[in-house]
């Protein structure tokens, strides 16, 4: 029935408006509570002891000393682990990871939790953890890209093949007029959302309540059900606000599972909040890569071959998440032949995981620099070289793109940036202060996935709406953009719609990841709203006292809280009047969304963009500043331009971070990260971010999903890293093929 209602999304109503984030006031006034703000009665504080070595065994704890400290309530070590029902060394579901919950004295990586102390106060628990004073039997850790021979990955982290081949790359290379063969390195990067991971766990018999920031609330509920052998319905996860997620808050990690187990064992609620340094180990990171790129071109500078081999560091005990850098080479340039190969090197590190644009971020850093080097060799402007290799259909599959406004991104971005005046040779521009000036560019690409989600929409007797789905707002703006979609589907202004979200007791909104949350959860909300309107229309059409009597539910449209007869707008009725005469009960609709497999078969679906960067570099000291960036992105329908631009800008800032700042530095003897704090692990501050400009290029996509949404969460990182690396070359004439690019790299290359 609902499919007979035609209810197009309308710009100018709610979607398409730059609505200010609805949770903004609550956040800036402190009214919004984060996980660690919860303090149930009787709560204990948990502090875990992080392993000080990366490989070996823990042999002794001064448990008595810790227990003797005032306020220490319990100490868990591998001698007396709090019970966990599921096998922690298994990977029970896709996306899940093995966890360390004191099941063994083995140490797999530095900062692995090896003991947990519960105290009446955070101070008592902290001191108890210090007093445990662990002793170790250390083995030589395997750290770095050359720690072990590289082996071919069995598959990519999302089940993608480890090797992708079309055409004959060797023949393509042999037939090329010119070629490059270049190797780039990217470092391990660690998740450092503003809000470190935290959990408050409270048991009531076999019922479990958890406050924790989470990007996939209902999915995670299933994971926790596995670890504690209770039905998922017995678990409530509350995650109303997150201080960032970026891929690290989608699955349960060891410290969180351990805190829940401890709470069950002692029969009191437990809070565990990670310290900043504890983020550098058990809660996932981006693996390091070494990427070899070979590109061949013919006399017209068309690519005859693209060969991309990426070797990524993985842990030793799961190894299923090689940073899938090769993703960046698929689907973008029209190379006659392509081969990509994912390799892994085992390290004594925690499990790598999804980190903003996993694969595309690191892969495009290398690919876009290699494209620049190839363009230089061919004597072509980097943009012209990319246009010569513009793919009209997806390379390899020959599928048409569902939409692709990349040409427009190139054109609009280049125009706004002023690319046309760029000298071809490096080292040609200086500013009034004698700084070297360079301009570089990169192409941005990210997939446009959709997952599965469900939602509920209710029209209340007073004519207002309630929409519900267990979405996650990591700061990207789900509270706002999803409500805008829902309001449109219900034909109501935004302030007449209540949006309930952020708890696992609501319908499953899928994962807030893969840049697919707006499309997925939004699709479900849209369907639920349409369903509610269809039911309301049935009531009106069947009611002889309604002006809409006899219209049939296909003959109405919903707008401003009224149903209108299609083609005769003089016939209309307010929702509350229809509901009142029908007996006064709320009208409920349900909806779900997912992408039919045949849609994905027919079209290749990506968001695209072009990023242009300017750097200024001190000619003597090689201090580097990104002084301007312009990113032009085409990502289908933009629900909220203000929030989308903020997301894209955040991605470009992350690109700056990748290009110039972030790197975990290891002590190879201990296997420990030496810079596990914000003094040593650099991320951009305001002074590093200047002159950022984001353009969203109009793109109608009739195929990607019914709402035409592609997503903007991750694409901003891609392209940006290469643009900055290329700008640094353009300023200095020096090609630095390892990230982040540091002053000493430029000095050494002198
Ligand atoms: Mo993301 S790395 O899909 O949260």
Image (cartoon, helix red, strand yellow):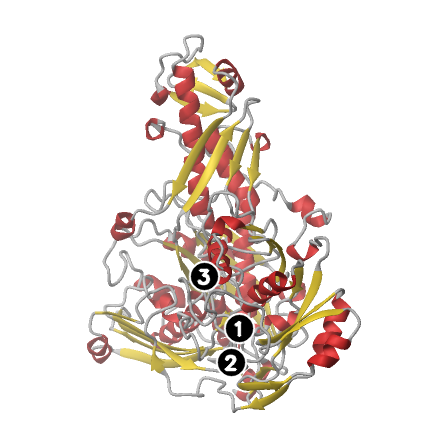
> Circles 1 and 2: CB distance less than 8 Å?
yes
Mark 3 or mark 1, earlier in chain? 1
Q: Which of 433 and 511 is in front in this view?
A: 511
- Expressed as whole percent of the image width and height from the top left, the position of residue 393 reads 26, 56
What residue is disc 3 on? Answer: 420
Mark 3 or mark 2, earlier in chain? 2
What residue is disc 2 on? Answer: 108
- Expressed as whole percent of the image width and height from the top left, the position of residue 438 reads 52, 71
Q: Nearer the viewer, residue 640 or 102?
A: 102
Q: Total number of numbered labels?
A: 3
Image quarter (top left, top right, bottom left or bottom right) of the N terminus = top left
Mark 1 or mark 2, earlier in chain? 1
- Expressed as whole percent of the image width and height from the top left, the position of residue 427 reads 51, 77
Q: Is mark 1 on a helix, strand or loop?
A: loop
**Residue 131 in sight here:** no
Task: Give the quadrant of residue 619.
Answer: bottom right
What residue is disc 1 on? Answer: 100
Q: Which residue lies furthest to the right in this view?
A: 70
């Amino acid at each position: 029935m609902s499919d007979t209602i035609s209810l197009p999304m309308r710009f100018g109503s709610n979607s398409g408006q730059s609505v200010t984030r609805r949770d903004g006031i609550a956040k800036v006034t402190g009214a919004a509570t984060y996980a660690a703000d919860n303090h149930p009665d009787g709560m204990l504080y948990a502090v875990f002891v992080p392993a000080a070595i990366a490989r070996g065994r823990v042999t002794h704890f001064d448990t008595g000393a810790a227990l003797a400290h005032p306020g220490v309530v319990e100490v868990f070590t591998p001698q007396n682990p709090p019970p966990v029902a599921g096998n922690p060394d298994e990977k029970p579901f896709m996306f899940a990871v093995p966890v360390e919950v004191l099941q063994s004295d083995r140490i797999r990586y530095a900062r692995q939790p090896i003991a947990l102390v519960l105290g009446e106060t955070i101070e008592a628990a902290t001191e108890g953890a210090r007093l445990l004073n662990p002793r170790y039997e250390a083995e030589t850790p395997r750290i770095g890209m050359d720690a072990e021979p590289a082996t071919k990955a069995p598959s990519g982290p999302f089940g993608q093949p480890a090797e992708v081949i079309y055409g004959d790359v060797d023949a393509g290379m042999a037939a090329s007029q010119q070629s490059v063969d270049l190797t780039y390195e990217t470092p391990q990067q660690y998740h450092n959302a503003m809000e470190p991971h935290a959990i408050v766990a409270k048991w009531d018999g076999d019922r479990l309540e958890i406050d924790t920031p989470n990007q996939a609330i209902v999915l995670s509920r299933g994971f926790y059900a596995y670890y504690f052998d209770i039905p998922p319905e017995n678990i409530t996860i509350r995650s109303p606000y997150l201080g960032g997620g970026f891929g690290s808050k989608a699955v349960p990690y060891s410290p969180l599972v351990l805190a829940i187990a401890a709470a069950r064992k002692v029969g009191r609620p437990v809070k565990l909040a990670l310290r900043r340094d504890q983020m550098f180990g058990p809660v996932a990171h981006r693996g390091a890569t070494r990427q070899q790129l070979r590109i061949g071109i013919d006399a017209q500078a068309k690519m005859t071959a693209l060969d991309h081999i990426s070797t990524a560091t993985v842990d030793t005990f799961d190894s299923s998440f090689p940073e899938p850098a090769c993703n960046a080479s698929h689907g973008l340039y029209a190379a006659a032949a392509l081969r990509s190969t994912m390799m892994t090197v085992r390290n004594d590190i925690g499990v790598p995981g999804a980190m903003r644009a996993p694969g595309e971020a690191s892969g495009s850093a290398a690919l876009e620099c290699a494209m620049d080097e190839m363009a230089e060799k061919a004597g072509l402007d980097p943009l012209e070289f990319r246009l010569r290799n513009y793919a009209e259909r997806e390379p390899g599959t020959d599928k048409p793109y569902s939409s692709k406004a990349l040409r427009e991104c190139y054109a609009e971005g280049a125009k706004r940036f002023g690319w046309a005046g760029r000298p071809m040779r490096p080292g040609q521009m200086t500013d009034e202060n004698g700084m070297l000036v360079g301009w570089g560019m990169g192409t941005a690409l990210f997939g446009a996935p959709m997952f599965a989600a469900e939602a509920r929409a209710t029209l209340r007797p007073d004519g207002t709406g309630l929409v519900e789905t267990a979405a996650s707002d990591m700061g990207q703006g789900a509270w706002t953009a999803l409500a805008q979609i829902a309001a449109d589907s219900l034909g109501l202004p935004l302030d007449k719609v209540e949006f309930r979200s952020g708890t696992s007791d609501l319908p499953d909104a899928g994962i807030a990841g893969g840049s697919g949350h707006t499309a997925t959860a939004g699709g479900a909300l849209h369907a639920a709203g349409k369903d509610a309107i269809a039911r309301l229309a049935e009531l009106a059409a069947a009611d002889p006292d309604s002006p809409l009597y006899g219209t049939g539910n296909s003959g109405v449209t919903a707008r401003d809280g009224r149903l209108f007869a299609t083609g005769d707008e003089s016939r209309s009725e307010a929702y509350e009047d229809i509901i009142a005469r029908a007996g006064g009960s709320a009208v409920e609709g349900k909806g779900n969304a997912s992408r039919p497999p045949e849609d994905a078969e027919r079209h290749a679906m990506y968001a695209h963009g072009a990023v242009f960067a300017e750097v200024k570099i001190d000619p003597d000291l090689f201090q580097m500043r990104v002084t301007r960036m312009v990113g032009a992105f085409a990502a289908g329908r933009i629900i909220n331009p203000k929030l989308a631009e903020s997301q894209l800008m955040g991605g470009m800032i992350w690109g700056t971070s990748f290009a110039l700042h972030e790197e975990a530095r290891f002590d190879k003897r201990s296997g420990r990260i030496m810079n596990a704090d914000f003094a040593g692990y650099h991320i951009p501050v305001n002074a590093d971010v200047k002159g950022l400009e984001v353009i969203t290029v109009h793109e109608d996509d009739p195929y990607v999903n019914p709402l035409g949404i592609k997503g903007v969460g991750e694409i901003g990182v891609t392209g940006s890293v290469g643009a900055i690396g290329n700008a640094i070359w353009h300023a200095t004439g020096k090609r630095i093929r390892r990230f982040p690019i540091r002053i000493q790299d430029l000095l050494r290359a002198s």
